[in-house]
Amino acid sequence: MKSRTKLWLVILISIVSSFFLFIIFTIISGHIWNNGYDLNELNTISQETLDTIKQKNALTANEIKPILYEVHNQHPALRYEWISSDGSTIFDTSGDMQSYDFNQLAERFINMPNNLWTENGQVSLIYSINENEQSYYLLLSLPSEAMKPGQTFLFVRSLSVLSTLILPLILSFLLPYFLSLLFFSSMNRRISKLNNALGQVNIRKDLVVLNDNSKDEIGQLTQHYNSMAQRIQNQARHIEQFENKRKLLLSNLSHDLRTPLTAILGYAETIHDGLYRDENALQTSAKVILQRSLYINKLLDQLLDITRQDMDAFKLHLAPHNLSEMLEKIAEEYLLLLVDQHFTVEVDIANEDTEVIMDASLVERAIRNLLDNAIRYGKEGHYLAIGLIEKEDEVWITVKDMGKGISEENQELIFERFYRVNEEASAEGLGIGLSIVKEIVELHKGNIQISSIPFQETVFLIKLPKK
Ligand code: ADP
């Protein structure tokens, strides 16, 4: 059953049951608080009295006296007056013997039974009989307190009073239902929205964001839905990016492997077929084969790094090391390498004994990656500088070149895995080097920054804590 149908059913049942309850409570409360005579009872008593009078043909004061006294004894609140047609009282149970004129008696008849009040706060009823061709009147009066309060209230006013009573009653019955109906329909609407949105959660589709800032349970549920949908979409985007990168890596890799392999195959075939000109040409071919093989070896190393990165396999083996010494040793190697390539190499290590607690082989790898990049991508500047500055709690390592540099929008991206600036021109690596550098630095709780002015200076700055 739909909640809307349930709601209507509940409302219907509650309206019917509240009407029943109302009736039952009215009867019970009537029994408790609504005591006294009602109009029917008074009519019955009076009618029985008149019947006795008729039966006994008791018309004179002496004849009527025992009959009316008997009734009066049974119902002391009731006052009976026996009146002749000219208005004079023949007998009065109160002993007052008041006389009436014709108008007074006629008025009593006219007002019955809608208005039974007399001016002195009494309720009075009048009955007439015809005996021996003469009219007699039986006048009944009682104090209003002796009447049932409900009856008094109704007969004080005209019948139209009923509508003024019943209308507010109905309204007061219906108002809570209308309010709850409004409340439930708004809840229903919110739940339906949530339901629809949940049904539409799909990683391929746009996110449906719901606007419900109320603090109740549905509001909270909506907030949870919003953050859940957001998370799902972020993860989907993440997976998509990852998938794109994986494809990119594969295509880079196959391209990067095929190029040197073609060269190797070509030169190897020449050697194999004995088609080289002289010993010199043989040496050149062997050199190219060696270079290209080394390059393939490097690519395979990088591939291994990717797998290691995926498995979080960079484990730190921390120990105190002399960073100055390590940098000097590396710098010497690069000096030798670049000596006949018209490169200016500068080494600026202020303190000879800068000791740092680190994983020496990982830090060395990070620095070599930066130096290789500076030579590879910044070779137009023919300049390479390595620096080490010691601060209070940290050390700053800089690698500087004067090449074409890295544009501002690329500076953030180059640390991402597989990201390479300018795909076509530089088929040199897998776009993994800097992401490894960053990972190593962050494992040491340090950070890496970059600043670049093309052909002036491109600086990578690694800050490492000493301990
Ligand atoms: P790869 O392993 O392919 O060299 P890296 O992550 O080391 O990738 O570098 C990412 C990109 O950053 C490179 O494609 C290169 O374009 C750019 N880059 C890195 N270092 C430098 C540099 N010193 N000067 C200019 N560009 C650089």
Image: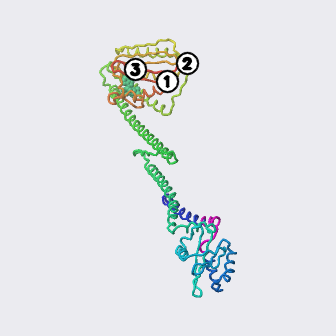
How far apart, in angstroms, are the residues tagged by discs 3 and 2? Answer: 26 Å
Mark with earlier residue (3, 1): 1
Magenta stretch contains residue 26: yes
| Pair 1/2: label in front | 1
Q: Which residue is mark 1?
A: 446
How far apart, in angstroms, are the residues tagged by discs 3 and 1? Answer: 17 Å
Q: Which residue is mark 3?
A: 459
Q: Which residue is mark 2?
A: 320
Write down the region rendered in magenta.
25-42
Is residue 192 in view? yes
Give the SS element for disc 2.
Answer: strand
The x and y percentages for residue 454 are: 33, 21
Q: Is residue 109 left or right of residue 458?
A: right
Labels 1 and 2 touching (C-beta < 8 A): no
Query: Mark 2 packing: few (<14 Cα in 10 Å), some, or many (20+)?
Result: few
The x and y percentages for residue 37 are: 63, 71
Labels 3 and 1 touching (C-beta < 8 A): no
Q: Is residue 283 left or right of residue 308?
A: left
Is residue 292 in view? no
